Amino acid sequence: MKSYVKLVNFEVNRFIKIYVSLLIITLLSQFIGVIVISTGLMKRAHEVMFEQNLSEKAYLHQFGGFDFTHISSTPWFIGPIALCIAALIFYSFLIWYRDWFGKNTFAYRLLMLPTARISLYFSKATAILVLIFGLLAFQMILLPLENALFESLIQENFLQTSMDVSSILQSNGILGIIIPPYFSDFLISYGIGIMFVFVLFTSILFERSFRLKGIVLGILYFIAAVLLYLSPLFIIGNETMPVLYPEEIFAIFLVLGIFIIGVSIIIGNWLISKRVLV
Amino acid sequence: MIEVNQLTKKFGRKKVLDGVSFTANKGEITCLIGINGVGKTTTLKAIMGLTSFSKGSILIDGQKINKNMYEKVAFIPDAITMLPQMTIKQAMQFMQDFYQNWNQERATELLTFFKLDEKSRISELSKGNTAKINLLMGLAIDVDYILMDEPFSGIDIFSREQIADVFASHLIEDRGVIITTHEINDIEHLIDKVILLDNGIVLKEFNTEQMRQEEGKSVVDVMREVYQG
């Protein structure tokens, strides 16, 4: 357990510089976006009022006011989130391959540590999850601050509605997936995310254990896991099958997700303990 | 004692090791010799559980390799096993964090002996200093057995001499060492046992002292006989 915690700390620290850079990019891009777009909206509103000789009331009647959705759907806002997601997906591969490739083979050292090798698997998975939830928490902190800044930059009369974090999340489809407003949605989104990490890690270990054959085995394992997880959809879509309540469908996906994670860990443990090559 | 029994390993259809058997005792230096590709490194990796094998068994003091064995056996490969961005100090700290029997006193002694600066980055080290750091990382763990893969490979004569001096020092005595090397001249006088490998099989196994006394042959003489006919 002690080694596992040390390994998690070690793995997180290895990515910390890039991670902090991602946080800074997110912060700067979203805050600059709020300033640029808010001032742009106000400027444009005044230009339209001047050109069309409209009063504030007439402008608002004709075009409506502004709210945070004017920000949350722009590349300023979504761009850094997409960048963070891409970086973490890429790092999910790199977290393994960086130990094998290059002049210095750190995999030797990791595999020879006096600890159960499954600790390596769990520590890398935990590190990825810590990084994901860290970004999520950071975004949750930024959102009300950005919203407050937006509301301070928009003239009070032009503010359509004062939105709280929950309504911002519900108003934007992409943001609603990344930070689900309801707990059940959160479980689904992040349950799938956690499952993806474990299935991917086991697929990578297939490749690291059997090399060329392992690539095929890894891809097949990944496809099999995806098909198994999606299999209820084929049954639900079949008219001859009984209709299921949403709670029942949720329970089926939950059980399948836990099963796939469990199988991935068991196979991953066997591969890293008995088959992996350096 | 490390016991390797009928070790067989295949890469595809090719047998890299074909029933290799030998023992290595504590307090002895056992040398695995053979041209490139005969299975020396694979044997060491198999002992350390870094590669699987098709048949045979490996026992270390009567036990199969498991996580606790890494406190008992250290492997020093011919590639550096630390992250390039680490300083030597950070690398030693890493080892101290994970190995209960890391001996910092011995690590410092080796650092001084090799005249290395703990602030140096691993990536900035020369090939010779890299080999020394590898040796340090293995020798500073209080293990009973040390496996070394080509510790003299591609390094300058002065670094070779320094490493050979370590073999003759108290840092090695009482430990069991299995070493693979082509640079046999540097440590021939220190080796207790030689295992000559070819095409994945043990061609000959002999005690060096016995060979010198009874047949008047050096290790190199026997190698010539065996490999060149």
Image (cartoon, grey):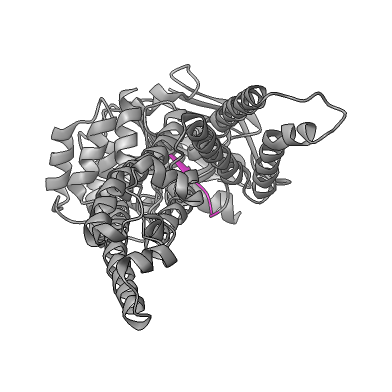
Instruction: Determine the residue located farthest toward the bottom in the rendered image.
Output: A51
Decide which of B108, B215 is in the foreground and name it: B108
Instruction: Determine the residue located farthest toward the right in the rendered image.
Output: A240
Regarding residue B45, the answer to whether it shows in the image is yes
State yes or no: residue B190 in magenta.
no
Seen in the picture, residue B121 relative to A178 is either above or below; the reply is: below
Residue at the (23%, 30%) spot, across then down: B102
Seen in the picture, residue A199 relative to A162 is either above or below; the reply is: above
- Tell me residue A80's x, y (percent): 38, 59
Residue at the (28%, 29%) spot, across then down: B99
Magenta-drawn segment: B31-36
- Quadrant of residue A17 in the image? bottom left
Seen in the picture, residue A174 relative to A64 is either above or below; the reply is: above
- Tell me residue A182's x, y (percent): 47, 33
Left or right of B47 in this view: A8: left
Left or right of B49 in this view: B100: left
Decide which of A105, B201 is in the foreground and name it: A105
Residue at the (54%, 34%) spot, across then down: A188
- Total count of labels: 0
- Quadrant of residue A122 in the image? top left
State yes or no: residue B32 in magenta.
yes
Decide which of A138, B130 is in the foreground and name it: A138
Regarding residue B205, the answer to whether it shows in the image is no
- Tell me residue A132's x, y (percent): 40, 43
* The N terminus of chain A sits in image quarter: top left
Left or right of A49 in this view: B32: right
- Quadrant of residue A8 in the image? top left
- Tell me residue A176's x, y (percent): 47, 45
